[in-house]
Image: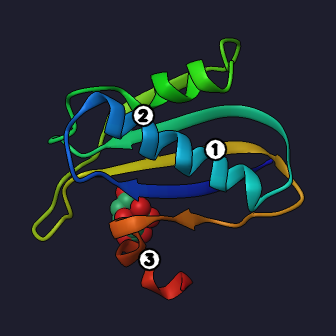
Amino acid sequence: MLGIRGATSIEKNEIEHIKKRSIELYNKILEKNDIQNIVTILCSVTPDITAYNPITAIREEFKLDKLPLMTFQEAMFEGSKKGIIRFLILCESKTQNFVFLHDAKSLREDLY
Ligand SMILES: O=C(O)C(=O)C[C@]1(C(=O)O)C=C[C@@H](O)C=C1
């Protein structure tokens, strides 16, 4: 088993925007990896994201009703970026490609 990370950013704390960015991130993680079997998906949101839970969007869109899913609030430190949605997928996969989209790319510039 391994962990596959991803993160994206939002510009508006609005339901449809959060759904769109969350689904886009999950789709890109699937596209860039060869995931066989998912054990769990953990999600964190920065405290400013309050309009909608990204993991609900993923559960509904990808029909993941049987998976254990959890969302947590990300710890904030001096200089931490706001508006960030993070996923950690624990799974079996032949690949381990992390995906950072939009403004979240700057969180891991070493990857790009
Ligand atoms: O990977 C991310 O999403 C980051 O923001 C980078 C980082 C890190 O410094 O390694 C920082 C905060 C997260 O909780 C996880 C990892």
Tell whether label 1 touches label 2 (CB within 8 Å).
no
Task: Choose the circle earlier in sequence order: 3 or 1.
Answer: 1
Residue 19 badge: 2
* Relative horizontal placement of residue 81, taking residue 108 as reference (left or right): left
Q: To which residue does mark 3 refer?
A: 108
C-alpha gap between disc 2 and disc 1: 18 Å
Q: Amino acid at mark 1?
A: Ile
Q: Is mark 3 within 8 Å of ligand 1?
A: yes
Image coordinates of residue 14 in percent, x first then y, are 23, 34
**Residue beneath disc 1:** 89
Residue shown at the point (23%, 49%) measured from the top left: 75
Label 3 close to label 2 by CB (< 8 Å): no
Could you tell me which secondary element the residue under label 2 belongs to?
helix
Q: Upstream in the sequence, badge 3 or badge 2?
A: 2
Q: Quadrant of the image for the C terminus?
A: bottom right
Residue type, label 2? Lys
Side of 90 relative to 46 (left or right):
right
Q: Nearer the viewer, residue 83 or 4?
A: 83
Seen at 44% across and 77% down, the residue is: 108
Where does residue 45 sit, x and y in percent of width and height?
31, 42
| Residue 51 occupies quadrant | top left
